[in-house]
Amino acid sequence: MSDQLEKVNLAEKFAQFSDHWNPRVVGELNGQQVKIAKFLGPFEWHHHEQEDEFFLVIKGAFEMHLRDKVVTLKPGEFMIVPRGVEHKPVANQEAEVLMFEPASTLNTGNLQDSARTRKDLEKI
């Protein structure tokens, strides 16, 4: 319980890792997880049947490719991708991103056997 009453410094959390597309959990509330990851290069097209996803850019920028458009997100900007919407994040330069989503959300959604699938996320 006392861990939940401590502040979280995102810069310190991001400094703890250097790999890309490998989310870490930095907080939990009401069945939701606060996750952070570094994005670089293209991810894979995927969707989530049951979960909406929230993406907030902390540092850098990335593009959210949707089937009908591309949305560029810069620091301080966020986007919610509704469940069922196919999407593909692409970062031309490294981006630090905070995500907020149900704990059940698999990072690769319907692509459960992708090389990038992370089922047991590290808590930092």
Image (cartoon, grey):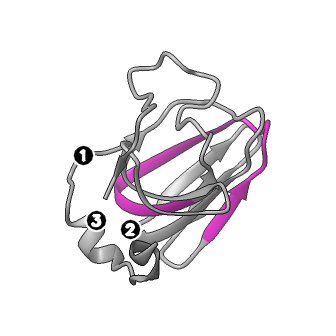
Tag 1: amino acid: Asp
Q: In the picture shown, does residue 105 fall above or below 33?
A: above
The numbered mark, 3 or 1, whose residue comes first in the sequence reads 3
| Residue 119: image location, x then y, percent | 46, 31
- In this rendering, which labeled residue sits more in front, label 1 or label 2? 1
Cα distance in 3D space between marks 3 and 2: 13 Å
Whether label 1 touches label 2, CB < 8 Å: no
| Side of 5 where 112 appears, left or right | right
Residue 38 is a magenta residue = no
Q: Which residue sits at x=48%, y=76%?
A: 75
Q: Find disc 3 in the rendering and name its residue.
A: 14
Closest to the observer, 80 or 68? 80
Q: Residues within 10 Å of mark 3 (few under 14, many from 20)?
A: some
Cα distance in 3D space between marks 1 and 2: 15 Å
Q: Which residue sits at x=40%, y=42%?
A: 121
Closest to the observer, 2 or 46? 2
The numbered mark, 1 or 2, whose residue comes first in the sequence reads 1
Q: Which contiguous range is marked in magenta?
A: 78-99
Secondary element type, mark 2: loop
Closest to the observer, 42 or 35? 35
Q: Which residue sits at x=52%, y=38%?
A: 107
Q: In the picture shown, does residue 3 fall above or below 31?
A: below
Tag 3: amino acid: Phe
Q: Find disc 1 in the rendering and name its residue.
A: 19
Number of marks in picture? 3
Give the quadrant of residue 60.
Answer: bottom left
Which quadrant holds the C terminus?
bottom left
Q: Find disc 2 in the rendering and name its residue.
A: 60
| Side of 78 where 4 appears, left or right | left
